[in-house]
Image (spheres, rainbow, N blue to C red):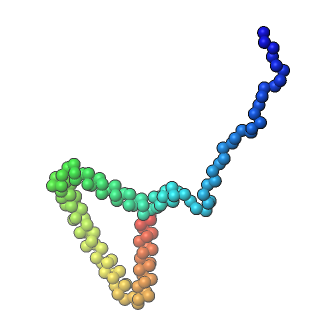
């Protein structure tokens, strides 16, 4: 049997190497990905995405069904159902449209600006709800 040595096992004097964390960019400057995500989440961008998607689906429908059949089976029936209601609503709104036009005609230039801002705010309120 070979004799064992009494000396402890040899260890390296070198300390283990630890990974160094990369310093991120300047904290006040968001990354390009963060900027793009923030831009893509705006209301305008979402509206653009919906419009592009709708146009794409319409183009796909025209390609699959064909333009003549699409007009015959979809557009004409929709137009026939919607146009009479739209004409009735437009005619019913005539007194209100005349009243609003009279307000603008009788107002001074600064009054017109105030009226326009007021109507924009009012429309924005109903648009948001």
Q: Quadrant of residue 90?
A: bottom left
Q: Quadrant of residue 3?
A: top right
In percent of width and height, residue 129 lies at 44, 64
Give the mark count: 0
Q: Viewed as shown, does residue 120 lie left or right of 88?
A: right
Q: Camera-side residue: 128 or 96?
A: 128
Residue plotted at (35% across, 80% down): 100
In percent of width and height, residue 34 lies at 52, 57
Q: Camera-side residue: 82 or 109?
A: 109
In percent of width and height, residue 12 lies at 75, 33
Q: Is residue 77 visible?
A: no
Q: Camera-side residue: 2 or 117?
A: 2
Q: Is residue 69 above or below residue 13?
A: below
Q: Is residue 20 above or below residue 94?
A: above
Q: Is residue 113 above or below residue 48?
A: below
Furthest-front residue in this view = 2
Residue plotted at (82% across, 19% down): 5
Q: Quadrant of residue 83?
A: bottom left
Furthest-right residue in this view = 6
In percent of width and height, residue 74 lies at 21, 54
Furthest-top residue in this view = 1
Residue plotted at (43% across, 70% down): 124
Residue plotted at (19% across, 60% down): 80
Q: Viewed as shown, does residue 121 lie left or right of 72?
A: right
Q: Is residue 12 visible?
A: yes
Q: Quadrant of the N terminus?
A: top right
Q: Camera-side residue: 9 or 128?
A: 9
């Amino acid at each position: 049997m070979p004799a064992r040595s009494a000396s402890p096992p040899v260890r390296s004097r070198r300390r283990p190497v630890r990974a160094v964390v990369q310093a991120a960019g300047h904290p006040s400057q968001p990354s390009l990905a963060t900027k793009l995500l923030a831009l893509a989440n705006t209301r305008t961008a979402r509206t653009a995405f919906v419009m592009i998607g709708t146009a794409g689906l319409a183009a796909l429908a025209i390609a699959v069904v064909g333009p003549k059949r699409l007009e015959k089976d979809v557009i004409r029936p929709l137009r026939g159902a919607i146009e009479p209601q739209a004409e009735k609503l437009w005619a019913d709104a005539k007194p209100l449209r005349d009243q609003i036009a009279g307000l603008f005609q009788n107002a001074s230039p600064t009054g017109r600006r105030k009226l326009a801002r007021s109507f924009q705010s009012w429309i924005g309120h109903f648009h948001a709800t």
